[in-house]
Amino acid sequence: MEMIVRTKQFFMGIGDLTYFAARFFKQLVRPPFEVKELLRQCYQVGNRSLLLVVTTGFIIGLVLTLQTRPTLIEFGAVSWMPNMVGISIVREIGPVITALICSGRVASGFGAELGSMRVTEQIDAMEVSGTNPFKFLVVTRILATTLMLPLLVIFGDLIALYGSSLVEYFKGNVAFKLYFNKVFEALSYGDLVPATMKSFVFGFVIGLTGCYKGYKTERGTAGVGIAANTAVVMASLLLFMVDFVAVFISDIFYEL
Amino acid sequence: MSKTSLQNLKLGIFVVLGTLLLLIASYLIGNGQNIFAKNVTLHAVFKNVNGLQIGNNVRFSGVNIGTVDKLEMSNDTSITVYMVIGEKMRKHIKKDAIATIGSDGLVGSMLVNIVPGKGGMGSVNDGDELKSYSRISTQDMLNTLNVTNENAALLTSNLLKVTQSMMEGKGVVGRLLTDTIMGQDFHRMVSDLQQGSQRANATLTELQGLVQRMNMDKSVAGTLLSDTLTAMKMRTSIENLETSSMAVKEMAQHLEQIIDSIKTGDGLFQRVTRDTTMSRLLMETMENIEQGTRKFDENMEALKHSFLTRGYFRKMERESGDDRGKKQP
């Protein structure tokens, strides 16, 4: 009996989330546009996350290269390091790591922020005062994450490749120019375009879950904590699901 | 207000930088695939492309100059490979260049190698076809190997028969293998042969030295060997010699006949050579003749001094002296 209730709740949650997403798209194309708030959110999401993303990316690139070096040396294929690291970072590791970091920082932030606004009835007050709270709070935030995440991914990729090239430079005496030449020789649009598309969706997912959980917060102050927590968990989980689907879709257009 | 404008500035920098990076990355990737540069398209027809794919590199003398653009199955035995090549490289590829399918290292991906021709031809133009050379595929190699294997099997069975008969001591080779005395003889023979060959070797080296000296100096032999004119002369003289030797031979035959006839015949010569009494008689006759002449000489001398004939001899002497005086005054 409990099982059925849970399954029912699960599907209700998914349905609710889908309605929320549909509402976002409906409000997105309808004026007025809250440009100023959008820019503020972009700054919050983009610039403020940059240091975090760059640090993570650098370490990931460094560690990935250090860890794979012995294996590649064993195969005598250490000269393929730039190709391997370049492709894995641009295709998968860059977008996923950046999105996970951002979901931790941004989705929880949105959940807590909107949750506390809901609990303190600021959203209701906004509605009474004639501002569309969904448009002002939700649309701007989701749009901001959707637009900012690909840029963060690009920065993250670059820094990760830089970290990898540092290892190659100091351990394998590979010049930076040669390293990046090889990386760009290995890469094709089939690597870059799906990854960029994917990061747009990742951004959308992070914004959507964060805002959804915050917007639908219930049960007082305790609910704020729950909203922040579930926002991060749900966003991370959804990210991987989206990633899975994205690989299949990009496989149709580009032969991987 | 100033806070928001500062934020906007930072956001603007962030966005512009990110977009720029994305553009640079896509440009660099596209550069590798010759999307932005001016290109020419060449094609070559292969029988087998060994798993070549669209986007594989095209190399000219080992330099990456383009990528495979399209693979088209013309019919069941020919595949047309279209290659996109940078305009800058066009002038270096001559019309007699040959395209082959190769692979990038042992485990690398396939690629098209363009090998320069012998030169002296003009550069290729857009849409030209290159001559192709299909490498022998593994399957062909295996087919050939199969035939070789069958032959080898036949050969080994024959060899087995031969060795068996050898072991049993049939035939000369079998005897050689089984007979120890013969083996020893053989051994001695070989050692003799070795000595002989060593000597021959020494002689040859001496001869070589001689020939070299002959070649070097202008001695008769040297000239004979090197001068073609002299050789011609030599040939004619040899021919002459031949004819003369023929004549000599003929003469010798005649002589032989004469001698034969002398031997068998009954003429004077035969008497002279054969009959010893005759020769003695002849000798006595000769001696008598000699005595006769001496006496005749004495008679003549006496005649000179007799008064009857003295005048005649004096006259003769005077005439001969006059002749001398006229000639030498």
Image: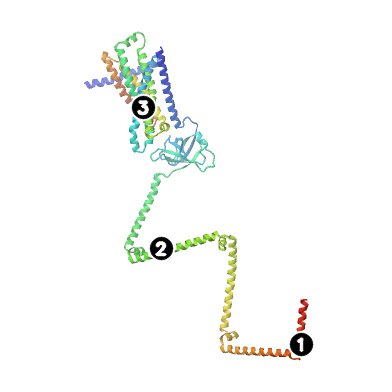
Q: Nearer the viewer, residue A86 or A25?
A: A86
> Which residue lies under the disc numbered 3?
A58
Seen from the viewer's position, the closer of residues B272 and B90 is B272
| Coordinates of residue A143 in the picture (x, y in percent) | 38, 18
Mark 1 Cα shell of 10 Å, populated few (<14), some (14-19), many (≥20): few
- Residue visible at 35% across and 32% down? A65
Q: Chain of mark 3?
A: A
Number of numbered discs overlaid on the protein picture: 3
Return the residue at label 1.
B312
Query: Which quarter of the image is occupied by the C terminus of chain A?
Result: top left
Q: Which residue corresponds to mark 2?
A: B194
Residue at image coords 56%, 84%:
B264
CA gap between label 2 and label 1 equals 96 Å
Chain-order first, disc 2 or disc 1? 2
What's the mark number on residue B321? none
> In the image, A130: left or right of B261?
left
Residue B104: x %, y % from top left: 41, 39
Chain of the residue on which disc 1 is drawn: B
Q: Secondary structure at mark 2?
A: helix
- Please state which amino acid type lies under the numbered disc 1: Tyr
Residue type, label 2: Gln
Q: Residue furthest left?
A: A1
Residue at 58 percent of width and 88 percent of height: B279
Q: Indicate which label's residue lies in the foreground, 2 or 1.
A: 1
Expressed as whole percent of the image width and height from the top left, the position of residue B52 reads 42, 38
Quarter of image, res B252:
bottom right
Q: Are marks 3 and 1 on the same chain?
A: no
**From what the image shows, is residue B114 above or below residue A13?**
below
Q: Kindly check if marks 2 and 3 are in contact, taking CB atoms under 8 A apart as contact.
A: no
Residue count near mark 2 (Cα–Cα under 10 Å), binned few <14, some 14–19, many ≥20: few
Which quadrant of the figure contains the N terminus of chain A?
top left
